[in-house]
Amino acid sequence: MSIGFEEFIKSVPGNKDVNFDVGVNIVPHADFETLNGPDVIVRRIINILLIKRGTYVFDPEFGEDILQFIFEPADEVTHSGIEQIISNAIEQNKGDEDIGFEVLFFRNKKGFRVNIILTTDGIVKNFPLDVDESLLGEEGQV
């Protein structure tokens, strides 16, 4: 079966004009999960938050690096910095969806939880993202 160029472009994961991507989980039929619709937008936002700006040589402005706040004090200055980074990532990627978020500091360990709240077609979905030292490499460096 042959498909045209337009159909091919629409099927490529990561295409910003199409809400389709491949997730990191493996589904029962031994393939990666397929994400579509608004879930793709939230996955993009989470990826941008976790990637350190300047990591990609050909797109040095890509990423937001929220990991830099893991060991910062749980105060208003840190909270404000985290909110600014999340707001930037959401603004760059949202479409017609209503996307909000809340930031909650952990009490028993360093780090915080970001709850990304997506409302579309009257359905509310919560996407929690725990940002703590488990996301850091073996050296524990940001």
Image (cartoon, helix red, strand yellow):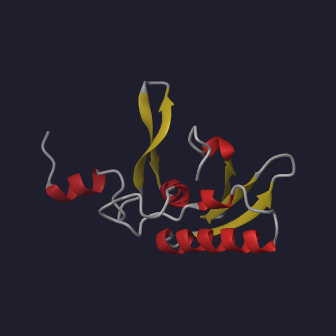
Residue nearer the viewer, 126 or 60: 60
Which residue is located at x 37 percent, y 64 percent?
16
The answer to whether residue 110 is above or below residue 96 is above
- Measuring from the top left, give residue 85's x and y in whole percent: 60, 70
Residue nearer the viewer, 44 or 6: 44
Query: Relative to residue 128, is residue 13 drawn left or right?
Result: left
Residue nearer the viewer, 69 or 35: 69
Which residue is located at x 36 percent, y 55 percent?
14
- Measuring from the top left, give residue 53's x and y in whole percent: 47, 64
Q: Quadrant of the N terminus?
A: top left
Q: Is residue 123 visible?
A: no
Looking at the rendered structure, the number of numbered marks drawn on it comes to: 0
Q: Residue furthest top?
A: 29
The answer to whether residue 11 is above or below residue 123 is above
Residue 88 appears in which quarter of the rendering? Answer: bottom right
Q: Residue furthest right?
A: 107
The answer to whether residue 137 is above or below residue 9 is above
Which residue is located at x 67 percent, y 61 percent?
69
Residue nearer the viewer, 19 or 142: 142
- Measuring from the top left, give residue 50's x and y in whole percent: 55, 55
Q: Is residue 142 visible?
A: yes
Query: Relative to residue 58, is residue 62 drawn left or right?
Result: right
Which residue is located at x 82 percent, y 68 percent?
75
- Measuring from the top left, give residue 109's x and y in whole percent: 81, 47
Residue 66 appears in which quarter of the rendering? Answer: bottom right
